[in-house]
Image (spheres, rainbow, N blue to C red):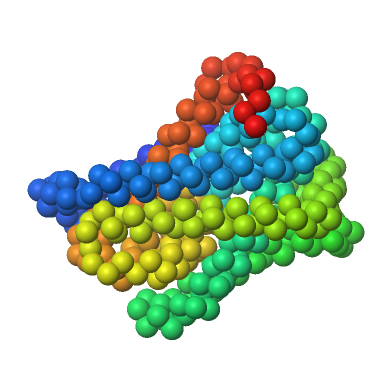
Amino acid sequence: MGKKFNYIFIGLCCVIMLVYVFGFTDWAGFAEMVNSVSPFWLVASVLCMVGYWALESLILHRFINKLCPGQPLKLSIHVSMIGQFFNCVTPSASGGQPVQAYYMIKSGLPGSKSTSALISKFMVYQCTLIVYTGILFILKFSFFKQQVDSFVYLAMVGFAVNLIVMGFLICISVFQAPTKKVIRFVLFLGEKLHIVKHRDILLGKVDSQIADYSIAFRENCKDIKNLLFTVGLSAVQLTLYFLVSVCIYLGFGLPDPQVLNMLAAQSFVLMVSSFVPLPGASGASEGTFVVFFGIFFTGATLNVAMLLWRFVTFYLTLLVGFLFTTRAGVIGKKSEPADHSDNLD
């Protein structure tokens, strides 16, 4: 029922977004604006997103091969795109890692190493996002403070949520005993309030997950070269994602593209909306895009730009991820994992 609700919710959000766009943009004007967008820059925006997926797969592949040498790149591509799909359809992108771990185990990888690879990838991504956006925040603070009402509040919320997540991961890795005590206390309260069931089983899973987190963290700290390399790849990956909106802006033929300002705006949109507890951060993503990119786009162009950006970054990812997920047999018809015997390294 939960999965069906998420799919229905995303579908409703798509309909609401279209109603919003068409409600503020007449049909003739909308069609004219879409036709006026340069096909070259639309293709460029899609290629940026494809590059984002490719680097996602490559970074994960490095962590998988570090723990399980000789794995084919095809496996990492499937795992990455499965994660992209389930991140899109679950609140706070929370469903990707569990399904990825399941598929990796089903494909023959040890459970602990699968989890460690996924954790390592997430920690590198999260750290890179915070540092990347923090630098842009410092460089462009004055500009956005003047242009966007409540900018400081929005930015602080985004940073706070991401820092809490990163801090929690570090605490799990470095301070295992105190973290376990806190989690056990929370589960105890949850059981007393009849929110948590099977507390002992959950405690066993928590202890196992904390051990995996700790192993992944310590392994990453030992291999500084690989850590720095994957951080660099993650920075390029994020830049490609941020450039989607720049390509759309250029596609409209608008003057004076403020590339660095738009990269900063897109990073703030991602930071603020990434942990909204709704499937695909629906509503928050569109809303923050309109808030920050109202600086660059004018009139009805803003609505069309938001629609194009959301299609490229979310709905296209949803579609492509769905194709990979069904092919792998994770949803739909039950089948064995896709054949990864052809090593594409």
Q: Residue at x 84, y 43 (%)?
A: 208
Determine whether 100 is above or below 49 in the image: above
Does any portion of residue 148 appear in the rendered image? yes
Residue plotted at (58% across, 44% down): 56
Q: Nearer the viewer, residue 104 or 181?
A: 104
Query: Is 170 situated above or below 147?
Result: above
Q: Is residue 149 visible?
A: no
Q: Tell me: 197 left or right of 242.
A: right
Quarter that holds the C terminus: top right
Q: Position of residue 215 (x, y in %)?
A: 84, 49
Return the residue nearer the eye: 280 or 243: 243
Q: Nearer the viewer, residue 175 or 196?
A: 175
Q: Is residue 182 left or right of residue 86?
A: right
Residue at 48% across, 45% down:
51
Q: From this viewpoint, which residue is outermost toward the left? A: 28
- Answer with left or right where residue 104 lies relative to residue 94: right
Location of residue 63 in the rendering, given as x and y in whole percent from the top left corner? 72, 43
x and y, in percent, of residue 124 in the image: 67, 55
Residue 229's spot in the image, x, y percent? 67, 54
Is residue 81 shown above or below 333?
below
Extreme right residue here? 177
Splitting the image into 4 quarters, where does residue 330 fall?
top right
